[in-house]
Structures are given as structure tokens and as C-alpha cells.
Image (tube, helix red, strand yellow):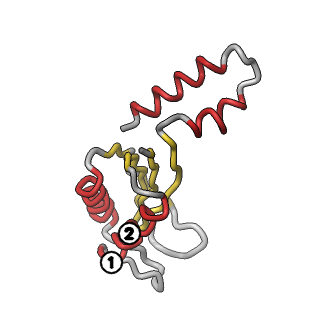
Amino acid sequence: MTVYVLGIGSNINAEYQCRQMIAALEQRFGKVRVSELVTTKAVGVEAPDYINGVVCLESDMSAEALQQWCKRLEGQLGRDREQRLCAADIDLLLALDCSGALVVEKLINQVKEPWFRPLVTELLNRSMRELV
């Protein structure tokens, strides 16, 4: 299983659209954790403010398959990539291997003191399990 962290956003009927994205993710993947929804300014284009949030879920789906599924959902919710207004945007932010391989290989090496490494590994692995 992999823990995925997705960014969601919209600037057309934004709160409703974010709730629709969350509902679709829950329907497809079951339990999801959701951050608060926040208002942000559009970047790089003159457009209405966005409402954005972060969703965390667990799946055995590959990252590529998840991205494809999210792009289909964006289309179902009215995303038109030719427009400045965005009905639905879902981006894969992180993919974390629940087995701890990512933690051991990428994060644990940042701990300089070797005696802390097993403790950090156990804590990070436990935290990853608690994400979902």
C-alpha cells in the first residue's frame, strides 16, 4: 500500500467543487483525511481566488494510475484546461511507501547520529500508518 497526498483546488463554485472532489475520493478509496480548505490567490494568471486543500489516502493503485484517475475526475467535474477558471484541480503531491522503504532510504539518512536512526525510523513508520 502507498499513502498518497493530493492537492485539490477550484476557483469556480470552489467550496462546492472541493467537496465534490473529496466525496469522489472517499467513494473510490474509502477513508481519506482532509486538511482545512484555504483561500489562495491565483498565481501566474489573472483569475478569481482558489480554495485549496490537501487529501491523504491509502491505495495499492500505482501513482500513474492514480494521476490518470484524478484527471478523469477533473473532467467529470467540468475542468476545461483552455479556460482561466478551474472547476477542479487534483495534483499528486507525495507518494509514501507504507513499508517504510522511502523513510529508510530518503529520510533516515538525514539523521547524523546513528543511535537516533532506529528511533526516528520507528516514529516515522508509525506516523505514516496513522495518516490513514
Q: Quadrant of the N terminus?
A: top left
* Disc on res. 14: none
Q: Amino acid at mark 1?
A: Gly
Relative to 76, say whether 40 is above or below. Answer: above
Are discs 2 and 1 less than 8 Å apart at CB?
A: yes
**Residue 53 appears at what percent x and percent y?**
41, 52
Residue 66 placement, left or right of 123: left
Q: Residue furthest right?
A: 112
Tell me which residue sits at (60%, 22%) in the image. Answer: 120
Q: Quadrant of the C terminus?
A: top left
- State the residue position of label 1: 78
Element under disc 2: loop
**Residue 59 appears at what percent x and percent y?**
37, 49
Tell me which residue sits at (57%, 37%) in the image. Answer: 101
Q: Residue furthest bottom?
A: 82
Give 76 or 100, whichever is nearer the viewer: 100
Tell me which residue sits at (42%, 59%) in the image. Answer: 8
Give 12 or 22, whichever is nearer the viewer: 22
- State the residue position of label 2: 88
Element under disc 1: loop
Tell me which residue sits at (45%, 71%) in the image. Answer: 48
Give 88 or 51, whichever is nearer the viewer: 88
Relative to 126, say whether 81 is above or below. Answer: below
Determine if residue 36 is in view: no
Give the quarter of the image for residue 28: bottom left
